[in-house]
Amino acid sequence: MNRILQDEILSQLENHRILLIEGDTGCGKTTQVPQFILDAFAKNGNATDCNILVSQPRRISAISLADRIAYERKEHVGDVIGFHVRLEQALPKEPGAIVFCTTGMLLRKLQTNPSLEGCSHVILDEAHERQIDTDMLMTLLKRVLQKNPNLKVLIMSATINTHIFQQYFDCPAVRIPGKLFAVKMHFLEDIEHLPNIQRYKTYVPKNRYENDEVEKLSVDIEKIVQVIKWISSHKPPGAILCFLPGWNEIVKVQSMLEDTSSYNEKHLILPMHSKISHNEQRKIFQHIPENVRKIILATDIAETGITISDVVYVVDSALRKESHWDNNKDLLSIRNCWVSRANVLQRKGRAGRVKPGESFHLISKKEYEKLQAHPLPELLCNPLEKVILNSKTYTDEKAEEFFSGFLEPPTSTAIRKAIRTLINLGVIDDEENLTALGKRMALFPTHPKFSKAMVYSSIFNCMYPVITIASLFSGEDNLFYDILDHKLQIRQNKRMYHPSSDHIAIAWIFKQWVNFNETAPHLIRKFCKDMMIRPIRIQILNQIRNTFIQQLIQCRMLSKTLLHDHDRNKSDIANKFENNDELVRAILYSATQQLIEHKDSGYKNGILRKGVNELRTQHHVKVVISGESVNYKRKVWPSSFLTYFNAAHCDVRRSTVIRETSIISPLTVLLFNQKKVQCHELDDNKVKLVINVNAHQTVRFVCDKETANVLLEFRNIVWSLVQYFLETQGFDHRSNLNSKQILEYKEEVFETLAETLKKASESIENRYIEEIS
């Protein structure tokens, strides 16, 4: 970046508190701007007054940028340049520094330091990506500027729709030209005429934006591989960067390439995905011998924010994974969708960094011109519960008012649906104020249903298994590898640890890993291989668990003393019932309130039939259980009820799929569903208990009057105790003369509860019940 541009940016920052910087790929805005701001302070003798936070949408970007700039300055990461991402950090020890962090970490910092005292500049990078956290951060930074008169904010964006940022912030803009070499674009019709590439016909829908057509999109893996091989054989040296929608496509392309023996010798194939470890990702940026061609298989993680200097060729599927939330069905739909024209140009721009490049796009020129101009903001197509709950840590405003300050607010319908969900979860009241439960959960960096489960686990004294389960499912990764090709083996492995609950099986598998780690670490590799577990994933799971344990301490649901005692004596009261599997499942159900009901009869082809083995959610959506689940194609059902965390509509399979389920007893449904129970008297001293789960589902139980009265009274006692400890746990009880008696009463009640649930679930725990594998 030339001196004139540097002086212009510094001059604008002298006269304005907020500045938009737009620049093409490779212009140096991310790497150079923070440095010359810091250097300007140093030149004036006040370097320690300059403390710059640079937010990045992804971990890999934050870490790799810190590595690169420290290298350029001939320093070590942690001297002047640092980074802070989830589970990993290297922070400068003295003021006068630049810290790269994820957008989520900066949002967390705002919760504890709402005016960002001690920070001179915030640089929000890759604003054009419009992730939920990015949009939220833009809104909050406008407020921080009013509290902190010394703060400067820089918004950095690629040259994509930047006028909306300028209007939103009412700020000047500086454009930095890029340093790209020419990149020649090849579209599908060009690719089909490449010599030695077999022509093929691909389905091109009439309208790629209609839901019933989009779902037909899939990656032509064979064509992708052919293009990569053709480039390798016909083009001069240079790395190839291939954009694919997701991990499964990456694995398939890598496998097909590696099946060619020459590729193992002459090519280095590197996957690039959020689930790859930091050390493995570093290989992507390293130089390799001249006689070896680097092939990088990536998702849109490689689109912006990072620089792979030796990329000369780009192969673009023109697809990405998109999550779409159906407010009516409470259902996440995951599909392949076409990227926008802006995304295609970003992908093209990854080539040509060191010399003229070429990009190959598996889409026709005509179809490219029909693509949307810009990607849709995440906020407009994802559930809002977590955003609303997080907002309560920054403001007392109601959700509608809070979102009104966003760059592009979500619809009122989506906001109201999220509010209703949070009310049903017991997190906020009808006035949108945080409840006692909500106050405990607000600072957890995960979806409310997972934080609710963890808070409850500390009250019901079965903390560790619940935290393990929540830690795994709060992320996007799977514990197992090669799921698509090894579903049977994974299912059998999990069944060794539990016959009817994927969640419990995973908790016990993790516990086994911990045992090996403590007593026989030399056996861990074999254990992971036998169980088909990705070692790096289970290590990350362990780190996330520790983070959540600290979160429970912070929200005062867990005592540091008890935690220390557990580690020494294995006698932590917070885990008294950790081996009661039904109680653990009950907490999962109570936290999610998500129920599947198995029906042995149903309509098929318009006729009521028996033996249909139908599963429907609380929203009456028909679902199928995935092949890796312990309950896949189950023949004998010890209970008609299952609970689950996530369901996703898979457009390729045209079905709603649930990957992990747990069978729960009818008693668990009655005691842990917190909806009002209606009683209807029947003949012969019988009572029908009715729970209206929602407008689509009603659960009915029939029992004698005496049993009904005992169960309902016991249910009230349990949840009264839960509410009491949500309000008081972790606070000083010395002034409360009854606290000891209440604790003793709680122990007595929960002992009874645990024993009752255990007895009610005996058939569920039976490992010898007849199954179909």
Image: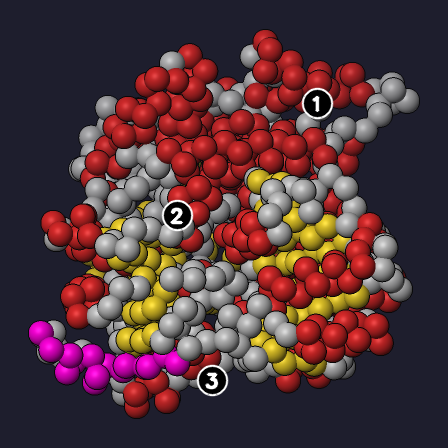
Residue identifier under label 2: 283
N-terminal of the pair, mark 2 or mark 3, is 2
- Name the residue located 74 percent from the left edge and 63 percent from the top edge: 37
Nearest the viewer among 379 and 516 is 516
- Name the residue located 74 percent from the left edge and 58 percent from the top edge: 38
Which of the labelled discs sits on residue 373, or is there none?
Answer: 3
N-terminal of the pair, mark 3 or mark 1, is 3
Whole-percent x and y of residue 100?
63, 53
- Name the residue located 31 percent from the left edge and 76 percent from the top edge: 358
Residue identifier under label 1: 560
Q: Is residue 670 above or below residue 234?
A: above
Q: Is residue 585 above or below residue 657?
A: above
Say few, some or many: other residues with alpha carbon within 10 Å of mark 1 (under 14 / 14 to 19 / 20 or more).
some
Q: Amino acid at mark 3?
A: Ala
Whole-percent x and y of residue 713?
63, 32
Q: Quadrant of residue 253?
A: bottom left
Q: Is residue 529 above or below residue 117?
A: above
Q: Secondary structure at mark 2?
A: helix
Nearest the viewer among 242 and 319 is 242
Q: Is residue 517 visible?
A: yes
Nearest the viewer among 762 and 362 is 362
Q: Is residue 693 visible?
A: no
Q: Secondary structure at mark 1?
A: helix
Whole-percent x and y of residue 211?
36, 77
N-terminal of the pair, mark 1 or mark 2, is 2
Q: Which quarter of the image is occupied by the N terminus?
A: bottom right
Q: Give the side of residue 170 with respect to residue 571, left or right.
A: right
What are the residue bounds of the magenta stretch?
182-196
